Image (tube, grey):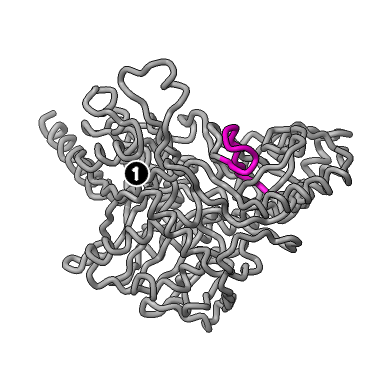
Amino acid sequence: MAKLKIKENYQRKRSLKEQGKYQIAIMEFLEGSDNSTTMPNKKDVKKVNDQQKPKRILNDYIDNLYDKFRLENQTFKVSRATFYRCRPSNIMPVSFTTKRSCLCIKHQNMALMTSKGLNESLGKSDRALDKFYYRNSNENLLRIVDDMDKEKIGFSKWQRIDIGDGRKKIGLVNVELEANEFKKELVKCADIFRQHVEMVTNQYEEIRKLKENLPNGHVLAQLDFAENYTCTTYDEVQSAYWNKTMVTVHPIVVYFRNIENGKIEHKSFAMISDELSHTATAVLAFLRSLLPMLHELVPNMSCVHYISDSQTSQYRNRYIFNVVAEHVSLFNVPVSWQYFEAGHGKGPCDGVGAVAKRMADNAVKRDKHVIQDAQSFFAWASQSESSINYIWVGKESIAIADIDIKATELKPIKGTMLLHAVFGHNESTIITREKSCFCEECFVDGKLCPDSVCGGWQQHEIKSVSLPDEQTVQREPTQYHNDDWIAATYQGDWYIGQIIDIDLVDGDYNISFLTKTKLRGAYSFKNPTKSDIMWVFSSQILCKVDEPSPVGKCRRAFSLSLDTVIEIERLFLENSSVTGH
């Protein structure tokens, strides 16, 4: 019995030693952005070793992730049971997820078509859906439809729906098709979906490769806008409850290689601003505040790689491309910009944003701080005990960046929505590729080799023309772009707004509208109490206008010149006579 007990203790100690040896590797693997997703809600936390950590949800079933781990780490002899035990408690299986938001519309529509149209139950895992369509060819999918033996097949899908007065919104609609029509739709969607999944996988893999093999002096900065923080107070009157102030929080997580030990380290930043617009202008202002700190953090910095999602109003547009081209002259360091596939940009920034907002809420609940606006948020953050470095970027800085970023008329890059890798070449030229690639042929000694055997690299000239100082209306615009200010009609009146997204297929535009002020008449506008964002038809756009100028002491109202308003009124009357409204 004594020998048996000694043997059991020895095996137990050996098991614990083995678990500790591989625990860090397993933890880093599970925390990878391609294996789990940080829940962005500030309430999604779990206590781990007396510390509050953000919850993460696995992107695939734990069995499949174990197989993937073994393939990527073939020298590790880790049993399946050890792998399960090493999973941190804040990284939760797919089945534990609650309500999910900001999901990929392509994955959700494909999941709805699969579950309701094909009667295939794949659970909540995106990876299971990916494998289903890679495992089944179009012929197999059609065979499944034939075996169902139905004349009509119904399913649901997310799409823009008309809500009247020329307005659209994203909603869930029920669709019923004849069996033959469903087959055509299924094959078309399956082909598009497989290409989408391939791009998602490639971007995660190449960015992971860049991070793991980050050259000395290179910095990887992943950035993303968090959901705006809503200010509250400990004891709040009723009228204040309906007039809450919001704060822009823009996290940035920076990775760099330590010169002394050669290990990859990271540092978290959070830009705080009282400017609520999430545009390329704000991004440039944030970079102007960040880069001097990066030069101090990494004195031998020789290149920056920005990583972001593919939001066209924020990161993937001609203004940011111009920043990439001029980055050396602006910040004295070359740059590349890598984009995740649309709908798949979640990462460490979601965790940083959630932590910052949760700590602010806790400070208010303890009645230790009063956070009523962006300035008081930053004042609290500056003295809080946190590993996050908070940086203030006010409206004034963003206004200056807006003037600079729009000082030249930039030529849009054809196929912008398809680009996922952008490198600066010189002040007027960028080099792009539809897929990121950091192989040994394309990325040699920390430098891009566009003539590599991989191919696909293209050079684009960004032509620029100085804009006139006078505010003018473009009377016959041939094309509108993201961030353009326009006048458009809806609900029997005209309004001005800014384009934040474009549907290249249907030719529709997503507009963030201003509302007309009652005190100043039709020539003045202000930001609405609640965001007024909607999709409109191209036929509803009257013309392009220059950005309205702020007026008043608080500069919360905006005005257009009299000539501009007269021209808009003329076009509005012409449009009304044609449409009969």
Viewport quadrant of the C terminus: top right
Q: Which residues are magenta?
A: 509-525
Task: Give the residue type at disc 1.
Answer: Val
**Nearer the observer, 457 or 527:** 527
Q: Which percent across, then down, holds residue 62?
A: 44, 40
**Nearer the observer, 338 or 575:** 575
Which residue is painted at 46% across and 47% down in the image?
346
Q: Residue furthest bottom?
A: 451
Whether residue 395 sits left or right of residue 564 in the image: it is left
Above or below residue 204? Residue 460 is below
Which residue is painted at 35% across and 35% down in the image?
373
Whether residue 4 sits left or right of residue 108 in the image: it is left
Circle 1 residue: 352
Q: Residue furthest left?
A: 2
Q: Judge whether residue 75 is colored magenta.
A: no
SS for dot 1 = helix
Whether residue 6 sits left or right of residue 68 in the image: it is left
